[in-house]
Image (cartoon, rainbow, N blue to C red):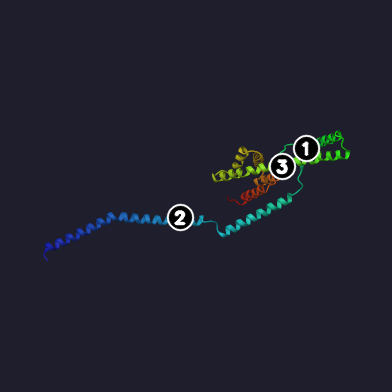
Amino acid sequence: MSELDIMQIAVVVLAALSAGLLVYVIIFPFVSGERQAEKRREQIASRRTRRAGVRSGPSPEELNQRRKQVQESLKELEARQKAKKKTVTMRMRLLRAGLNISPQKFYLVSAFVGMLFGVGALAAGLMPALAGVLVFVGGVGLPRWVLGFLANRRQAKFLDEFANAIDVIVRGVKSGLPLGECLEIIARESPEPIRSEFAELVEQHRVGVPLSEGFERMMERMPLPEVKFFAIVISIQQKTGGS
């Protein structure tokens, strides 16, 4: 083989090596970048997997602890309700009926109505015994029947609007408003008797009365199963958290 052939072969080999080196220099950044991008994708995927595991729900231990807290709250509320069970006072009857008068005024009005019934019976020529019965009916029976009628009517109106009030709370909490502000919205914009009941609740909360105790007082004024259940839910939420 002549020197010319050797030089041609060397030139070809050198050119091939140069071309290979050039190709490697051009392609390597893309290859390394793709590898880095693949690594980043794997890292992001692993993070999402871990987050999904966290968001999948509380552990069985946390669920058991939450159940215990709820059971303890229910037992405490039931014990407090049993301790508070007592004869309903005339003041509470008036509040349930929505009458903003004192018991003394109610008794005076009842006595006046009873006297009217008695005088009317005597003027009609009825026997004194029958007039006495009418005095009892007008002074005791009729006023208490009116109180019961007004209380039942007020409770029926309360129930008609109570679902809307709860809806305001749910929508407000979902939008990020605190529970206290949702209660203030109800106290301002709801019709009676929802407005007055929640206004009393908000006013008590402003002076330092806990919401659970405020709802218990509302239960006394509105002895309804729906109000009792809602009060229990609020009490548990205030103690254990959650939605």
Tell me which amino acid carries mark 2: Arg
The CA span between labels 1 and 2 is: 68 Å
Which residue is most to the front? 125
Secondary structure beneath disc 1?
A: helix
Which residue is most to the top? 123
Tell me which amino acid carries mark 1: Phe
Label 3 or label 1, whichever comes before in sequence order: 1
Q: Position of residue 91 (x, y in %)?
A: 75, 41
Question: Which residue lies under the disc numbered 2?
Answer: 48
Label 1 or label 2, whichever comes before in sequence order: 2
The CA span between labels 2 and 3 is: 57 Å
Secondary structure beneath disc 2?
A: helix
Question: Which residue lies under the disc numbered 3?
Answer: 151
Tell me the residue at 31%/54% (across/down): 30
In this view, 10 is above or below 104: below
Rate crowding at label 2 as few (under 14), some (14 to 19) or many (20 or more) other CA atoms within 10 Å. Answer: few
Residue 136 is marked as none
Would residue 170 appear left or right of 38 to someone viewing this image?
A: right
Is there CB contact under 8 Å for labels 1 and 2? Answer: no
The CA span between labels 3 and 1 is: 15 Å
Rate crowding at label 3 as few (under 14), some (14 to 19) or many (20 or more) other CA atoms within 10 Å. Answer: many
Looking at the image, is mark 1 or mark 2 nearer the viewer?
1
Tell me which amino acid carries mark 3: Ala
Tell me the residue at 39%/57% (across/down): 39
Quarter containing the N terminus: bottom left
Residue 106 is marked as 1
Tell me the residue at 13%/63% (across/down): 5
Looking at the image, is mark 2 or mark 3 nearer the viewer?
3
Q: Position of residue 58 (x, y in %)?
A: 55, 56
